[in-house]
Image: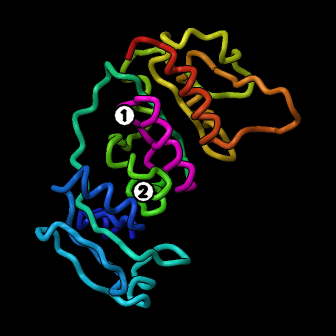
Amino acid sequence: MKKYRAEEKLILVEGMKLVLELSQQFPDLVHSFYVDKNEEIELDPSFTCFSCSTSELERISQFNTAPTMIGVFKEPSLPEFDSTKRILVLESIQDPGNLGTIIRTADWFGLQQIVCSKDTVHCYNSKVIQASMGSAFRIPVFYENLDEFLPKWKLPIHGALLNGVHMNEIDPSEIKILVMGNEGKGISEMLQRHISQAVTIPGYGQAESLNVSIATGILLHHWSQSKKD
């Protein structure tokens, strides 16, 4: 539950592959492991590990089918926000799978920070962690009041909208802040006031729109063509 995650500063990570990868990359963040008693696995003896029955793992798991290993990790500490680096801004992303996929894609394309509206699903939600395949541990995610945040930096702001300039007509080096909107409603009118250039992904078929994580991936690929951070 979000309330207790915030109080304890702990994160639940499910699945042996992901838990082991994160424990190797971030050993200092390991709190404890919970492993199916039928699994034979060698772990660093310094880690706290509990043997569990299948029914116990099912009670802990957030998923329909419980994994054979669950890890509890401490939250990574957030670095200072850096306005000189590229900024991906997400407004009201509700689906954990979408946010996790966006974080993973941002990690692939080398972004170093993401800023979310305060009503966006939390980046340490178990399902976000799963969809991000651990990238949520590597990419700092800040939660801000976007109506106050966006004008603060006095930088050009590009936003994904259906009536914008085609993506290929925009020099990726000119993009400093990229805003992506809610799954169903897009970017709110409140935030559209701050956008200096609307961007559209050209489409050639009959689909009405793109999934927000897919659209973000396409725009991040375009953005990555810039040689500047």
The residue identified by callout 2 is 129
Q: Quadrant of residue 50?
A: bottom left
Q: Is residue 49 above or below residue 24?
A: below
Mark 1 or mark 2, which is nearer to you? 2
Measured Cα–Cα span from mark 1 to mark 2: 16 Å
Q: Is residue 141 on the magenta stretch? A: no
Query: Decide: marks 1, 2 in contact (CB < 8 A)?
Result: no
Q: Quadrant of residue 150?
A: top left
Q: Position of residue 151 (x, y in %)?
A: 42, 23
Q: Is residue 168 above or below residue 118?
A: above
Q: Amino acid at mark 2?
A: Ile
Q: Is residue 136 above or below residue 106?
A: below
Q: Amino acid at mark 1?
A: Gln
Q: Quadrant of residue 146?
A: top left
Q: Position of residue 124 (x, y in %)?
A: 38, 57
Picture mark count: 2
Specify the quadrant that holds the C terminus: top left
> Which residue does the image show at 66% across and 18% down from the upper left?
167
> Which residue does the image show at 62% across and 33% down from the upper left?
189
Q: Position of residue 213 (x, y in %)?
A: 60, 42
Q: Is residue 43 left or right of residue 201?
A: left
> Which residue does the image show at 64% across and 35% down from the upper left?
215
Task: Name the foreground residue: 53 vs 128.
Answer: 53
Specify the quadrant that holds the N terminus: bottom left
Classify mark 2: helix, strand or loop: helix
Task: Using a 10 Å C-alpha cutoff, classify the residue at mark 1 as few (fewer than 14 neighbours), some (14 to 19) or many (20 or more).
Answer: many
Q: Position of residue 109 (x, y in %)?
A: 46, 30
Residue 113, label in figure? 1
What stretch of residues is rendered in magenta? Answer: 95-119
